[in-house]
Amino acid sequence: MGTTYQSIAPDVKLGKGVRIFNFVNMYGCEVDDNTKVGAFVEIQKGVRIGKNCKISSHTFICEGVTIEDNVFVGHNVSFINDKMPRATNVDGSMQSEAGWKVVPTVVKKGASIGTSSTILCGVTIGENAIVGAGSVVTKDVPPNAIVAGVPARVRRKV
């Protein structure tokens, strides 16, 4: 751990015992007690991460995501916050932040998200659910369910 290669904005709220590794970019977010943030992670404004979470390396957590307590997020997980992303407006001008709406996503207490999964916006991953590695989550995951695949489908209960 170190601060040489971190970009932690002054508006970031960190709880006690938070561990942040190198090459992390965080701004406008909250990370609660005893959470670990691995290398090469970006956490954007408005994100809330609970206590005792593990955010593995190379993960992208965008605006609109809430992660409750005791959640595991595997390596290279990407969250999406816009259902219809565009670079430009109809007239060809560059789209600004005013041109789209953040669609919230919630990861409930005790859930686990496997490596290289993609979580589309507007979904809730239920308590203690498990998302298999490489899955694309396009709809809500029930509590205590194990989902996997593209798109992710319930395989069984925990």
Image (tube, helix red, strand yellow):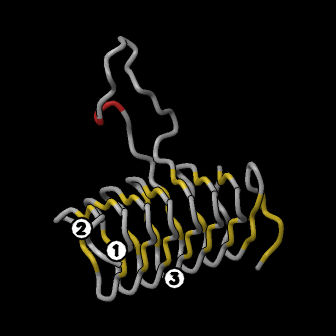
Q: Is residue 102 left or right of residue 146?
A: left
79 relative to 82, above or below = below
Residue for point 43% across, 61% down:
40
- SS type, badge 1: strand
- Separation of residues labelled 3 and 2 (CA atoms): 20 Å
- Quadrant assignment, res 12: bottom left
Q: Quadrant of the N terminus?
A: bottom left
Asked whether 117 or 111 is in front, the reply is: 117
Q: Which residue is mark 1?
A: 31
Q: Is residue 115 left or right of residue 42?
A: right
Q: Which residue is mark 3?
A: 70
Residue for point 70% across, 56% down:
135
- Separation of residues labelled 2 and 1 (CA atoms): 8 Å
- SS type, badge 3: loop
Q: Is residue 111 left or right of residue 23?
A: right
51 relative to 60, above or below = below
Q: Reading the chain from its start, which is encountered first: label 3 or label 2?
A: 2
Residue for point 42% across, 73% down:
37
